[in-house]
Amino acid sequence: MKRYSNYEFISARWYNQIPIHWHLIRIKDLISQSNAGAWGNDPETDNGTICLRVADMDFNLGVFKNKPVSVLTKRLYTEEQIEKLTLEQGDILIEKSGGGEKSPVGRSVYFDKSYPALFANFMQRIRFKHKLIDAHFASYLLRTMYYRGATWYYVKQTTGIQNLDLNSMLAQERFPVPPREEQDQIVRYLDWQVSKINRLIAAKRKEIALLHEQHKRRISEAVLHGNDDGCCQKDSGVEWIGMIPEHWSVIRCKYVFTERDERSIAGEEEHLSMSQKYGLVPDSKLDERRMLSESYVGGKVCYKNDLVLNRLKAHLGVFALSPQKGVISPDYTVLIPNAERILPTYGEAVLKSDLCRRELRIRVRGIIEGFWRLYTDDFNTIVIPLPPLKEQEQIMKHLSALNNKFTALKQRLEQEINILHELRTRLISDVVTGQVDVRGIKVPDDEYINDEITEEEFEEESENNEEE
């Protein structure tokens, strides 16, 4: 792409030159209004207050186009507060606080229409003077500042919380501002090009989703029906299992699993936590924050290859084999697989298969959804297929090879997605700082594609579909 003919060199943290006909304007001189988000607890009374939703933004989207606001909670606010906090077309939200070194600060979101929603206290709304700068163009500039790390220079550390100083320090930062007509062209061009990249990212995310579904089907097929396609089959007599090799049997879980209820006396064993992503692992290996108990005295003890179930979430597949001896929540269930009849890894694979998930779901008990529990007596009634031990070993070797193949394919697609992310970030950065000239490029009418579905969102969506 071509560059501008003449540049002026600038001493700035996130760009070093701009086209000579562009201007440098302090952010504070471009802002017409800036408001912090809603603080505090709900009022004790609803007298003179109105209940509205509070927006919880996904800042990874960068530009917020025609996407409904997700709901964080409902709170009561006065009409005066609502007037200050309601989001209007062209508003930009900046995430101004974070809880640690890796916690994002300075990410921004642009609104292309009004929203009847408030925003929380860790965000700040900015409205720009539209005659000087297009808000959409400003959002691309703020996004570039964030990705180039410039926002971190304006963060204050207070009581363990990082706060972006928007009103004094950051407000002195200078934006590179082209003529208004040129801003409009830059926004049209970036929306067009970013949409094309987002379509590619979305397509690759869809590939990963399809790969994930195929992987689950292959696992279910192997653990329920084996690997020998030429083997004679018989009816298992169990509806969800269907046909099985004629030399296999079916068995209730009570005959291959025994509950262990051993308690920790001193609580000195290593504490293990259940994660839907990682399984049962030591706390030190989890990247998310957890509320940890001060004492594990009386916690349940598990040993390597015990099957540990989170009773509240077992019907969602939240259970795993223990990798070692440790202490866990007393609300978990610990089951000892009968090693003479079933391989622990095979038992886990069968119970986690998609078809068996339904058997787990119909056995949970409880009045309120979210507090349903799977008790051992109900778990014991589940019937599972049981091949000979040697064949179980063969099936698990096959699944190990399948997992390796799936992981390699997924990693390749994720690397391609990362490259596209980097391309998108570099493109936005180069265009909004004037490193390339897009004035003469004809931009077709194009529907803006916001961003791809993330892996976490896909997994969440899959779980919701399973529950339904």
Image (cartoon, rainbow, N blue to C red):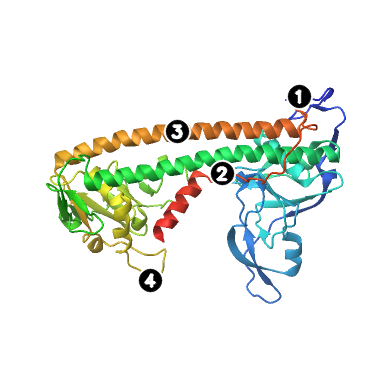
Q: Which residue is mark 3?
A: 411
Sequence order check: which comes first, mark 1 or mark 2?
1
Tell me how far mark 3 sits from mark 2, CA to CA.
17 Å
- Checking the image for residue 101, the label placed there is none
Q: Nearer the viewer, residue 9 or 332?
A: 9
CB contact under 8 Å: marks 3 and 1: no
Residue carrying label 2 = 452
Quadrant location of the N terminus in the rendered image:
top right
Quick one: label 3 or label 1, which is nearer the N terminus? Answer: 1
Q: Is residue 134 left or right of residue 120?
A: right
Judged from the image, the secondary structure of the residue bearing numbered disc 4 is loop
Residue at 52% x, 45% y: name it.
454
Report the residue at 55% width, 39% height from top: 201
Identify the residue position indicated by label 1 in the image: 2
Q: Residue 242 vs residue 208: left or right?
A: left
**Upstream in the sequence, badge 4 or badge 2?**
4
The quarter holding residue 42 reads bottom right
